[in-house]
Image (cartoon, rainbow, N blue to C red):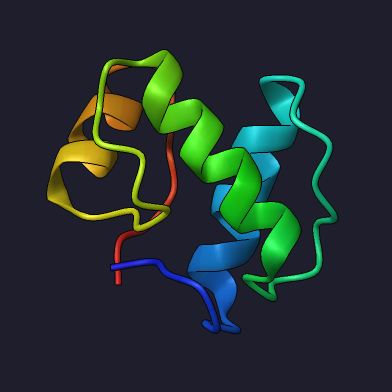
C-alpha cells in the first residue's frame, strides 16, 4: 500500500501519475499532505472511497487507467 508518511520509489511513481492527470503535487517521493489531498480527490473522482490510501481498489482502478507504477 502507498499511504501518508511513506517515502519511497512507489510514492514517486504515484506522484508522477497524479501530476500527469493534472494534480498539483510535488514529485519528491514523500507522501505528505499534498499527495494525500490529491489522492483523495482522485479516488472520489473515480467513485472510490476517498481514504488517501492507494490500496488494492485504487491501485487496480489506476492500472486500468494508465498507471504503470509498482505497488508496495
Is the residue 4 above or below the residue 54 in the image?
below
Work out which quarter of the rendered image holds the N terminus and state it: bottom left
Q: Position of residue 59 (x, y in %)?
A: 27, 42
Q: Position of residue 26 (x, y in %)?
A: 85, 55
Is the residue 28 above or below the residue 57 in the image?
below
Question: Which residue: 22% across, 55% down?
Answer: 55
Q: How many numbered badges does the structure rendering display? A: 0
Q: Please state if 36 lies on the left or on the right of 21 as rendered.
A: left
Question: Which residue: 69% across, 71% down?
Answer: 29
Q: Nearer the viewer, residue 60 or 45?
A: 45
Question: Which residue: 84% across, 36% down?
Answer: 24
User: Which quadrant of the view contains residue 63?
Assistant: top left
Question: Which residue: 15% across, 39% down?
Answer: 57
The furthest residue to the left: 56
Q: Position of residue 44 (x, y in %)?
A: 40, 24
Q: Please state if 38 lies on the left or on the right of 42 as rendered.
A: right
Q: Please state if 29 lies on the left or on the right of 49 as rendered.
A: right
Q: Nearer the viewer, residue 70 or 47?
A: 47
Q: Position of residue 11 (x, y in %)?
A: 56, 65
Work out which quarter of the rendered image holds the C terminus and state it: bottom left
Q: Please state if 19 lies on the left or on the right of 13 as rendered.
A: right
Amino acid at each position: 500500500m502507498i499511504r501518508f508518511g511513506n517515502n519511497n520509489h512507489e510514492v514517486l511513481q504515484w506522484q508522477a501519475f497524479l501530476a500527469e492527470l493534472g494534480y498539483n503535487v510535488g514529485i519528491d517521493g514523500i507522501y505528505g499532505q499534498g499527495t494525500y489531498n490529491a489522492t483523495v480527490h482522485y479516488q472520489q473522482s473515480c467513485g472510490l472511497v476517498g481514504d488517501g490510501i492507494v490500496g488494492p481498489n485504487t491501485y487496480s482502478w489506476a492500472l486500468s487507467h494508465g498507471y504503470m507504477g509498482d505497488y508496495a
